[in-house]
Image (cartoon, helix red, strand yellow):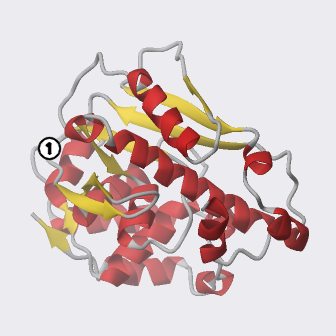
Amino acid sequence: MIKEWIEEYGPCNEEEILSALREIMQEITLAGLSRTDFFERAAFYGGTALRIFYGLDRYSEDLDFSLLKPDAAFSIEPYFKTIQDEFKSLGLTVSIKEKKKNLQSPIDSAFLKAETIWQEIILEDIIKETGVRSNRTLKIKIEVDRQPPLNFQTEEKLLIRPFSFYVKCFTRSSLFAGKMHALLFRKWKNRVKGRDWYDLEWYIKKGIPLDMQHFLARAKDTNDWQEDSITQEQIITLLDRKIESVSFDNIKEDVIRFIKDDDALNIWSPKYFKELAHKLKFSN
């Protein structure tokens, strides 16, 4: 079954096979969680949610979730066995370990690893064709925000493998709000995340409106915005300033391994993104 799933991606090299396998592991993890009360308590968001359920054309690495209401005592650990059982039902063995943090954090993190996945999946033909090394370790980070900013919208989205089930997800507009907040206020000093800009372009080109209420909740939660309201013009001004402050060479370098068509980045420049910014749509 796993081999057939991978072949559906049409991978051409080792990295594409690894990306396909990682996405399959993400979907199996979601399937395991769907057998529990997890999606009564939390919703799926972030780049992986955008790719799996809304058609974003780049790969994403992590599984990000937000509780529906704050709960500082929440732990992902009780769900580990169900996730592992889901992999076991497909003939795969994975380990999951909760990440212990020295500092108090609202984020509960865990790492799911499949160290023997190449031995357990019959991939001889694909391995011969692409030269994949069978000793590669696949790892997925799972994060749950236990004290999230609220005012987001959710909807049920269907996934049909490894069986049919529903996942509670942020809507596209609320996902856009989280992405815009990350792009504008990510605390990475001089580092940039090219995937933020790739996703921004995707949202605008798709005509998806930005959820202003959730954006405001996130900006106030991180103390990046102190006022009780924000206007469309203020958001565009913030974005224009960000565009002027970043290196697009660095942005392209970061995103290039996550996409198939490098030529799509040729047009990227401050001028291009400033013009895109003025095509933003908003939802109150």
Q: Is residue 102 left or right of residue 216?
A: right
Q: Which residue is drawn at 53% across and 12% down?
A: 102
Q: In this view, does 51 lie to the left or right of 11?
A: left
Q: Which is more toward the observer, 241 or 61?
A: 61
**195 w.r.t. 89: above or below:** below
How far across and how far down the image is residue 73, in percent?
Answer: 29, 16
**135 w.r.t. 238: above or below:** above
Q: Which residue is drawn at 20% across and 68% down?
A: 233
How far across and how far down the image is residue 30, in percent?
Answer: 41, 47
User: For numbered disc 1, what is the local secondary structure?
Assistant: loop
Q: Residue at x 47, y 44 (%)?
A: 29
Residue 125 occupies quadrant? bottom right
The answer, for residue 223, to whether it is visible in the render is no
Q: Residue at x 76, y 77 (%)?
A: 12
**7 w.r.t. 226: above or below:** below
Q: Which is more toward the observer, 252 or 133?
A: 133
The quadrant in which the C terminus is found is bottom left
Number of numbered discs overlaid on the protein picture: 1
Residue highlighted by disc 1: 227
The quadrant in which the N terminus is found is bottom right
